[in-house]
Image (cartoon, rainbow, N blue to C red):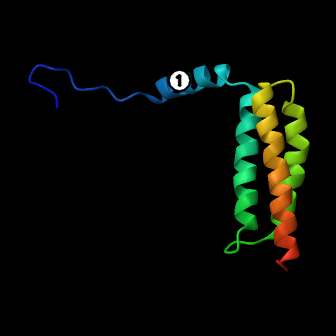
Amino acid sequence: MAEAGDAPERQPSQEDLLEQLQSELEQLKVADVLVQTVFTVSSLGYRSLGEEHRDLEQAKLAIDALRALVPVLKGVVAAELARDLEELVANMQLAYAKAAATGS
């Protein structure tokens, strides 16, 4: 709550927002975006394996994409994260096999 005599808080201008975005983009690394992509694709893939939203074609696409992306990150991200990502792909492949065996 502003007290009497306080200047009203200035809203950032479009230019201020663009400068802030540019600053954040300059700090962003490709590896960061790829790791986030892996997490997003895996979430969508696991969702496609669930009974409510089962879509084995989409789940397979997610697995194929992860199998392409995860090796690229090996040696770029921490070894522990690389192992976790490899385990994520293996677990998704197992979940896919189980879902496919139950007759989709």
> Label 1: which residue?
20
Observer-nearest of 29 and 49? 49
Residue plotted at (74% across, 42% down):
37
Name the spot of residue 15 as percent of width and height, x first: 50, 25
Q: Secondary structure at mark 1?
A: helix
**Residue 74 quadrant:** top right
Residue 56, by quadrant, is bottom right
**Residue farthest to the left?**
4
Q: Position of residue 93 (x, y in %)?
A: 86, 57
Most extreme residue toward the bottom, as rendered? 103
Q: Is residue 10 above or below residue 41?
A: above
Is residue 58 left or right of 19 when viewed as pictured? right
Q: Quadrant of the rendered structure where residue 33 is?
A: top right
Tell me the crowding category of disc 1: few under 14, some 14 to 19, or many 20 or more residues within 10 angstroms, Cα based: few
**What percent of the width, then of the height, locates residue 62?**
82, 55
Q: Is residue 7 above or below residue 33?
A: above
Instruction: Pick the residue in front: 14 or 34.
Output: 34
Residue drawn at point x = 40 percent, y = 27 percent: 12
**Residue at (81% x, 35% y) in the render:** 83
Image location (x, y in percent) of residue 60: 87, 61
At label 1, which amino acid type do we have? Gln
Image quarter in which the N terminus is found: top left
Q: Nearer the viewer, residue 40 or 15?
A: 40
